[in-house]
Amino acid sequence: MNPKIQVSLNPNLREMGASPTLALNERCKQMKKDGIEVFNLGIGESPFPVPGFIVDSLRQHAAERTYLPVKGLPELRSAVADYHRRQDGVDIKADNVLVGPGSKLLMYLLQLSFAGETLVPTPCWVSYVPQARLVGAPLRLIETGYGEKWHLDGAKLAEACESGPKLPKLLILNYPGNPDGGTYSSEELESLAAVARKHGIIVLSDEIYAQMHHHGGHVSIAKYYPEGTIISSGLSKWAAAGGWRLGTFAFPESLGWLCGAMADAGSQTYSSVTSPVQWAGVTAFKGGPKLEAYLAHVRRIFGMLSVRSADMLREAGARLHAPEGGFYLFPDFSPMAGKMEKRGIRTNKDLCEAILNETHVAVVPGSAFSRPDSELTFRVSYVNFDGAKAMAASGKVPLGKPLPDNFLEANCGKTLEATRRICGFMNQGA
């Protein structure tokens, strides 16, 4: 090392570390290289194939090579605006849609562009808090609990607004939720919307799992607070195209100034999203019967698997709410803290490390989602199965009928085996 080169790292990065979920995924890959069979329930990636007609669109536009507008391909922005009008009943104009290389970067640019305090209910997705700290934004965590179904309510939001610094506020709300798989009722959303309107809060509603509500019943808070809500979506979850890196933000007319500022930041960072992917995105957001059939099979499979997995974890001693969307569970084994302490396990990190070492099942500790270390929570991503095989098997059963009882064992066996291993670990010495 050249002694004249000094270590000079941005202080906001010094204790940042890698994304816990991505780091765990890399660890699982290394264990597999070392010949260890690993059951990876840590990564949040859909196991299903990208719908064929969307892949066909990507192929058809593979020769598209020019830089597109930083805000996104006009046809795509129109398709996204129409999508939100159709799905969420909100009046989004194409000019107020921003397309980015994944919604993750758009969230970062939002916190970079917004001058004010960021409010984040916990548990929360792993990157909301590090992004706020990375840009040096004032940040406040609002803790929820199992008894509240891990939900923020209007009273807690009002308290956060009235007790904190007198700064403009950005609330990040995510549902169906990562890590808990829960969602908000219309009544809860109306309550939050009333508080947000009273205090002039901007709401970033991260609805990346909206189409994966297990009963197709997602409702956006933008329905009740259209003038102050930014809706985040993209192709990574409901279209199973995480690696394509296409995210979207839909702004109301009143927040066009913020959309413009973020586009300016985008022009100085990512320039534009890959052209062929944007053209394929037009096809995806336009939807149609093929996409609806695809989503119906995804919801049916995930719905059945989530209920079975949740039942198994409850029988092993977890406190766990019924899953409602996405592909996550957030079991709380805190009632077993005394038993775990006798085994040298005092934190959720200890618990996840022991589960990985003893059962070769990877799950993500609750502390990665901004929960207390002492709370014995972790996230389960029930995606460790062959999605193409499961989709083909579901396709043989009419959508109006339930899947057969043996469907999960035949098509999602690895996920069930991983869950059994977790339950066996928790019940050792019982």
Image (cartoon, rainbow, N blue to C red):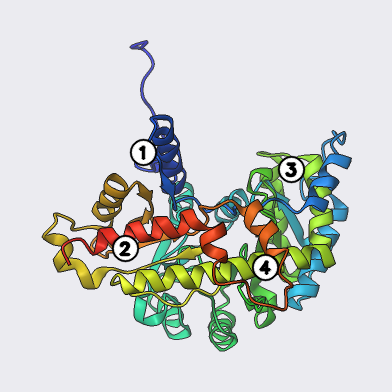
Asked whether 16 or 236 is in front, the reply is 236
Residue labelled with disc 4:
211
Q: Residues within 10 Å of mark 2 (few under 14, many from 20)?
A: some
- The answer to which of marks 2 and 4 sits earlier in the sequence is 4
Q: Element type at marker 2?
A: helix
Q: Residues within 10 Å of mark 1 (few under 14, many from 20)?
A: few
Residue labelled with disc 3:
273
- The answer to which of marks 2 and 3 sits earlier in the sequence is 3
Q: How far apart are marks 1 and 2 (CA)?
A: 37 Å
User: Does the CB distance between marks 1 and 4 fall below 8 Å?
Assistant: no
User: Does the CB distance between marks 4 and 3 fall below 8 Å?
Assistant: no
Residue labelled with disc 2:
423
Asked whether 129 or 306 is in front, the reply is 306
Q: How far apart are marks 4 and 3 (CA)?
A: 23 Å
User: Does the CB distance between marks 2 and 4 fall below 8 Å?
Assistant: no
Q: Residue at x 33, y 63 (%)?
A: 371
Position of residue 135 measured from the top left corner of the image (x, y, whole percent): 49, 48
Asked whether 425 or 26 is in front, the reply is 425
- The answer to which of marks 1 and 4 sits earlier in the sequence is 1
